[in-house]
Image (cartoon, grey):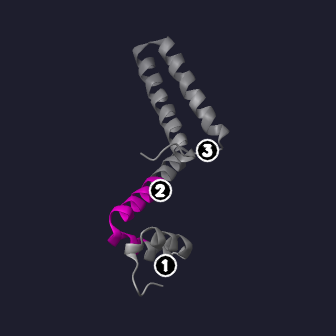
Amino acid sequence: MLGLDHTTVLARVSDIAGRARTAALEAADAGDRAAVLKAGDSELRALGILTANGETSEQEIALRSMFRDIAAAVIRLARHDAAAAEPVAAELDRMHRSAIAADIREQYPESRIENRP
């Protein structure tokens, strides 16, 4: 579990908006006007939160969430597999992110190698 960072919260609000939209459509198909209004209100509130946070694309929210998950997976892998930490650090060096690479090497010293950049 990653916690409640800004990206996680917005992804969850986006999910709520999507589920509310689905519920409103299903209620409309069933002829349940009260449920349509209730679900529509939930969707509108969720979309209002997203808009208030400057969001303009559900796809961008999903992409940021995916990137966050990938980054967390890489860090977890490095924590549990020292052999994985050095290739991650080396790739960060190639990406000109040497400060992050150095931080990974400091956190996971058993991954250090003699001939690193």
Residues at marks 2 and 1 touching, judged by CB atoms closer than 8 Å: no
Q: Residues within 10 Å of mark 3 (few under 14, many from 20)?
A: few
Question: What number is the disc on residue 56?
Answer: 3
The foreground one among 20 and 71 is 71
Q: Secondary structure beneath disc 1?
A: helix
Is 59 above or below relative to 81?
Answer: above
Which residue does the image show at 53% across and 36% down from the upper left? Answer: 13
Q: Main secondary structure of the magenta part?
A: helix
Q: Residues within 10 Å of mark 1 (few under 14, many from 20)?
A: few
Amino acid carrying label 1: it is Arg
Residues at marks 1 and 3 touching, judged by CB atoms closer than 8 Å: no
Which residue does the image show at 42% across and 69% down from the upper left? Answer: 108
Numbered disc in front, either 1 or 3: 1
- Name the quarter where the N terminus is drawn: top left
Amino acid carrying label 3: it is Thr
Say which residue label 2 marks.
67
The mark that comes first in sequence, 2 or 1, is 2
Is 86 above or below relative to 57?
Answer: below
The mark that comes first in sequence, 3 or 2, is 3
What span is colored magenta in the figure? 68-88
Which residue does the image show at 42% across and 57% down from the upper left? Answer: 70
Is any atom of residue 27 visible in this view? yes
Residue 70: say if magenta.
yes
Marks 2 and 1, Cα distance to the nearest angstrom?
A: 19 Å
Is 57 above or below relative to 115?
Answer: above
Residues at marks 3 and 2 touching, judged by CB atoms closer than 8 Å: no
Say which residue label 1 marks.
94
Marks 3 and 2, Cα distance to the nearest angstrom?
A: 18 Å
